Image (tube, rainbow, N blue to C red):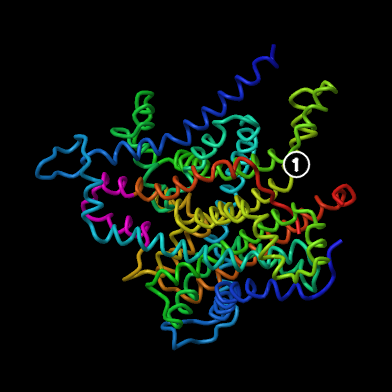
Amino acid sequence: MVLRALPLLKTTILMTFVVFACLPLVQMTIISFVATLPQADTKVGSLTLGNYANILANPNLFSAFGNSIAYVLINIGITVPVAIPAAYAFSRMSFLGDKHLFFAFIAFRITPPVVLTLPIFQLFSALGIVNSVFGIALAHCLFNLPISIWILQGFISAIPKELDETAFLDGYSRPRFMWTVLLPQIAPGIAVTAFFCFMFSWVEVVFARILTTTNGKPISMAINALFGFQTDIGLVMAVTVASMIPGAVLLFSMRNHLSRGFRVGKV
Amino acid sequence: MKDRNNTGWMFVLPAVLLLSLVGLIPLITVINYSFFEIFILDQRFWVGTEWYSEIISSGRFWSSFGYSLLFSTLALSIQIPLGVAISVCIPRQQVWVGLTLAVVALPLLVPWNMIPSLWLSLLDPDTGIFGRIMAAYGWSADWKLSVAQTWAVIIAMDTWHWTSLVVILCYSALTTIPASYYQAADIDGAGPWQVFRHIQLPKLQHVLLMAILLRFMDSFMIYTEAFPINAGGPDGATMFLAVDLGEDIKAFNYGPSAARSVLYFLIVLTVAWLFIKAQNQLDAPQTTEAN
């Protein structure tokens, strides 16, 4: 009897959790459609699309979206090509200090950004990349690069070693093997990695805040700037909803990769 | 066996250079600052380990350390079992599984500085969905005055934000279990608990270790989300380590905040070391099986 009820119980637990996950998002979405500041043509508390119209009307918000997309793409563009050879090395080769190096990477992944804010700001000022999307993209490599190496090396380790050996017998060099044989094999892994980079980078605020005081503000900072003496909370929520759309689109297009499973292995 | 040669360094070199730039150099700078009294950055005086002894002997540091430790313990003991339970509840092959996972992962996409605002509006007794339900049961709007309720809100918020990551990691590990394992268990008459204990849990070990590492460090150093909920209050009861450091940096106390940062990095190193130890422990009995 208990066993008969198990699938039902599981579905109930799962659905309860889904509702819990959605509840704050529903709240946010509702507020985003409500007028929360007195305006000429709408009463406070009435349903409106005005908040979304205000996003389009505000050039700061509009450019913030562009900045966010730009720095995330640059970050993925730096992280993935650097992570693939490193992940390959950790997965297939043994070299002097490999364990220690992996340890150092893990340590940097879990270093809280707030610890490094001041020197990163100074260093990036000296390099002239503050207030630009490039600075944020580079700073986010601190946590995205280790996690990418970790995820990718799981995918590479899942590929039989014979694939490498056959290719080398056929006269492939290592770089050529990686480019023509390995890359197509780990394509889903690259997609998962890119998604995780996107996810951790898009929502990060500590580096984003200190590295953009005048220019290049990402969407999270543009939302911050909306808080003030009289905060239009409806607009704030509308921008937050809008800021989640690119991620949600990515998430839905990635959903089968996520559920097909990716390996996170040992070194 | 892996190839034993040092050409591996050629492959990791770009990653090493990049992390040196954004990680190692700033870290060395922080260590350097931590020994100085700094008014403006060109003018500094050597003070030796004064900041360190000041921090180590201050009650404020140890109380925020204690709060952070308690917070991480609570967060982990809720989020890890919950994440595992949810991932086990997700069926293995259904069309709607991908969709469910995607919906569950949505909280991960909210900008971190907006998470407190979301929860504050959710809990608002006049307009919030949750606040209104609770108000009907006599829950009052002055929860910010209560230590327990502030903690409950921050824990609930963190659970909402991050359990999805545990679910995704665990579920992805579960899908690598071949169907034949379950069939064999079925033939042997194994119950659901035995299937979980002997088939699913062993597969989850590596991923759980990673989830614990990430969740521990991220909750231990919670910063962006915790402060706006109640500004570290009531009475500093939610003044976590990183929140305290953030306030120090905002006050331009370069020297003391650098010393504090170095102490935090030592904590980071300890945790990473424990993690590597635990990982080796996991791998030790399995190496014969894996190869």
Q: Is residue B248 left or right of residue A190?
A: left
The image position of residue A98, as x and y in percent, is 76, 69
Q: Is residue B132 left or right of residue B197?
A: left
Q: Residue at x 44, y 52 (%)?
A: B112
Q: Is residue A111 left or right of residue A136?
A: right
Q: Kindly indicate the quadrant of the structure image that contains residue B139.
A: top left
Q: Residue at x 40, y 60 (%)?
A: A68
The image position of residue A133, as x and y in percent, is 41, 69
The residue tagged 1 is: B203
Query: Of residues B46 and A79, which is closer to you in this image?
Result: A79
Q: Is residue B151 magenta?
A: no
Question: Callout 1, which amino acid?
Answer: Lys
Query: Of residues B89 and B221, which is closer to you in this image?
Result: B89
Q: From what the image shows, is residue A182 above or below residue B150?
A: below
The image position of residue B52, as x and y in percent, is 59, 72
Write the start and end of the magenta stretch as one range. A218-239
Residue projecting furthest to the left: A40
Q: Kindly indicate the quadrant of the structure image that contains residue A38.
A: top left
The image position of residue B98, as x and y in percent, is 55, 37
Query: Of residues A55 and A43, which is closer to you in this image?
Result: A55
